[in-house]
Image (tube, rainbow, N blue to C red):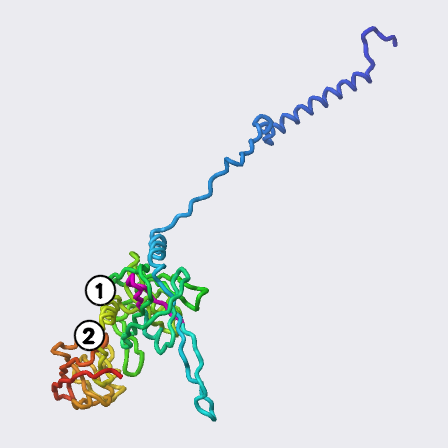
Amino acid sequence: MPKFRGEYPSSRISLFTLLLTAAFMGGMLILLAVRFTGLGQALVVPPATPQKETEKEPAPVQIITDYEQATIEVVNRVGPSVVMITTTTLVEVKDFFFGLVGYQPVQGLGSGVIFRQDGHILTNYHVIEKAEEIIVVLSDGREFPAKLVGADPNNDLAVLKIEGDNYPVAKFGSSADLRVGQLAIAIGNPIGEGLKNTVTAGVISAVNRSIATGEKSALRDLIQTDASINPGNSGGPLLNSRGEVIGINTAIIKDAQGIGFAIPIDKAREIADLIIKGQLRRPGAIGISYVPFDESNKKLLEQRYRIKLPVEQGFLITRVYTGPAAKAGLKAGDVIVAINGQEIKEGANFTGLDLKAGDRVTMDLYRGNRKFKVEITAEPLE
């Protein structure tokens, strides 16, 4: 068949058609990719410019609560007036065959608080009891020998004096209006030098507490707190949120957690002033042991002692020692219902008798159903 000018072979036409179709399909695939994969946005949005080193966001500011700020300010204000007290006591060394063979020095540790610029320090009596040497270490590390000005063992208080002047002092507050639940901060020296001026915080857990310190002695009207009072904290201050001393830390309950006690500062201040003036009277006693009672424990006492109590509340005398009470004719089983004309109304919550040598005490008592009255003069507590 003859070929005409301008006519292409069929094989060339098929190749051309195939290329055109492929180009069309490729274009469609590109458009679909741009439309559904976000590639188009990536193509038109410029990449983020890295921030310069100086444009970094500032670190967040640490927020301190009012509670924390109060504690920090108290520590800064009072810390310099809290001292560490180290003592040396000589203890007898005995041999089974030869008896006393010598003395061994034993180191003790406690705390105290400077309350006068001339170097007077308030602490616990049990911190310095029987000490041959007393050293006071200030918060700045300076050490001074201290002398004992005087002590009141019955209230576990003592006053020391170091030479010098212009020392940092703590401000005394008042313990008369303490409220259960208010902030309480303790500063002291538990363990030793490595933990000097340790701070613990808690609340006032209770007031007017009493704890026995011996068969015939007790600490009364104490402040109870859950601010940790560790060994070595004894004698240190208990503070309120204003940085005022409200108590002198004195004791803990060993078998419990969060139960510590402090001597109210109103009592401690009065005793410290009397010690410095040389006017402190010796503690007195009349020579009895007794159990306060009311309706909460009356039946229990009646069952225990196999007696019938004649009144709803009072003091049941459980023992009479040699001394004024025995001379006045008191006996175990007598019930005290009034002291110096004041009827006993506290019952089991009574905090105890706080007597001085020479105090005259008038008591109304029951022996069985017979009521009588006695007057007793307290003698010095041995």
> Of helix, strand and loop, which mostly describes the magenta segment?
strand
| 66 inside magenta stretch | no
Residue 167 at what x, y percent from top left?
32, 60
The percent position of residue 154, horizontal first and vertical second, equals: 27, 77
In front of the other: 182 or 222: 222
Q: Position of residue 291 (x, y in %)?
A: 24, 81
Quadrant of the image occupied by residue 337? bottom left
Q: Is residue 257 visible?
A: no
Relative depth, front residue between 152 and 142:
142
Residue stretch rendered in magenta on the structure: 109-122
- Marks 2 and 1 close (CB-CB < 8 Å): no
Q: What residue did someone put label 1 on?
A: 176
Three-letter code, disc 1: Ala
Secondary structure of residue under mark 1: loop
Q: Amino acid at mark 2?
A: Glu
Residue lying furthest bottom: 97
Instruction: Please identify the quadrant where the C terminus is shown.
Output: bottom left
Residue at 29%, 77% in the rendered image: 153
Provide the residue designation for mark 2. Answer: 346
Q: 108 above or below 93?
A: above
Q: Marks 2 and 1, how far apart in space?
A: 18 Å
The single residue placed furthest to the top in the displayed view is 5
Give yes or no for residue 119 being in the magenta stretch: yes
Query: Residue at (31%, 78%) from the top-left corner?
Result: 213
Between 291 and 352, the one lying in front of the other is 352
